[in-house]
Image (spheres, helix red, strand yellow):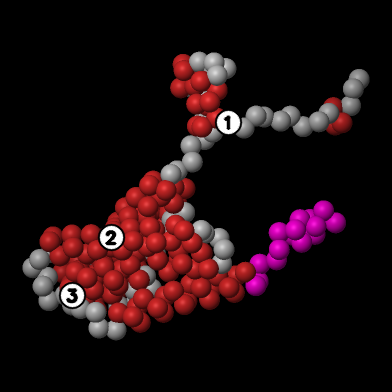
Amino acid sequence: MADSSSSPPASFPKPPLASDLTLMMEEGRVSPSHASTSNVIVSPTNAHKIIAELVGTCIIIFMGCGSIVIDETYKLTILGIAMTWGLAVMVMIYTLGHVSGGHFNPAVTIALAASAKFPWTQVPAFVAFQLAGSTLAIRTLVLMFHRHNNVHDQKITGASMNPARSIGAALVFAKFHHLWVYTVAPILGTVTACMIYSLLRPPMNEKMGQGQS
C-alpha cells in the first residue's frame, strides 16, 4: 500500500485576472459563456478607490457629527456619540476596506505613504476626495438640521483627529481659526504611530526563520 503521507499536497489553480480572461477569450481558449461563470479576480481601479474614500468618509462624518447634533435634543450622551463614531468607522472598513484600504482620513493616508506602505502618487487624489466627502457630510447636516444654527464649528471639530472632518467643517462655516492645529497634529500623530509600529514589528524574514527553527 502506498504511503499517503508522502504524496505531494494538492495545488489548485488561481482564478484568472480579468485582463487574463479577456486575452484568453480573444485567443479563443475560453468561450464567453465559460468566462461569465468563471471566478475572476478584479482589482479595483483608482477611480473605484477614490470614490470609496469619498463615500466612506462622507458616511462616517455624517453619522459621527450627526450624533453630536442629535445629542442636543435626544441626549445620546458621550457614550452614544462614541459608539456611533466607532460603529460608523467599523462598518465602512468592512464595507469598503477591500476597495480602497479604508483610510477615510488624510492623516492615515499620509502616514501610510510616509512609511512606504502606500504610493505617494495616489495621496493627492485620496486626500481630495476625503475632503470632498467630509464637506458634503457637513453641508448635508446643515441643510437637514438648519434649526441648529447655534451649533458652532468647534462643537463639530472638537477632538477631531481627522483633518478631513476639521477642514470640511471649516469650509462650510467659513471659520479657519486654529485650523492648522487640527490639520497638522493628527498627521504628526499618525506618522509617529507608523514609525513606532515599524520599529516594534520584527522583519518578516526573521519571523519566518524563527518559525522554521
Please tell me whether mark 1 or mark 2 is closer to you in this view. Answer: 2
Question: Where 163 falls versus 88 (above or below)?
Answer: below
Residue 15, numbered circle: 1
The single residue placed furthest to the right in the displayed view is: 1
Crowding near the residue tagged with mark 2, few <14, some 14–19, many ≥20 C-alpha atoms within 10 Å:
some
The amino acid marked with disc number 1 is Pro
Residue 81 part of the magenta segment? no
The secondary structure that dominates the magenta segment is: helix
Rendered location of residue 128, percent (x, y): 33, 61
The amino acid marked with disc number 2 is Ala
The N terminus is located in which quarter?
A: top right
SS at mark 3 in the image: loop
Residue that appears at 57% across and 17% down: 29
**Label located before the other in sequence (1 or 2):** 1
Quadrant assignment, res 160: bottom left
Rendered location of residue 117, percent (x, y): 55, 60
Crowding near the residue tagged with mark 3, few <14, some 14–19, many ≥20 C-alpha atoms within 10 Å:
few
Residue position for label 3: 174
Residue that appears at 33% across and 67% down: 164
Quadrant assignment, res 131: bottom left
The amino acid marked with disc number 3 is Ala
Rendered location of residue 126, percent (x, y): 39, 58
**Label located before the other in sequence (3 or 2):** 2
Q: Which residues are magenta?
A: 199-213
Residue that appears at 33% across and 58% down: 129
Residue 108, numbered circle: none
* Distance between mark 1 and mark 2 Cα atoms: 36 Å
The single residue placed furthest to the bottom in the displayed view is: 178
The C terminus is located in which quarter?
A: bottom right
SS at mark 1 in the image: loop
Residue position for label 2: 132
Q: Is residue 88 visible?
A: no
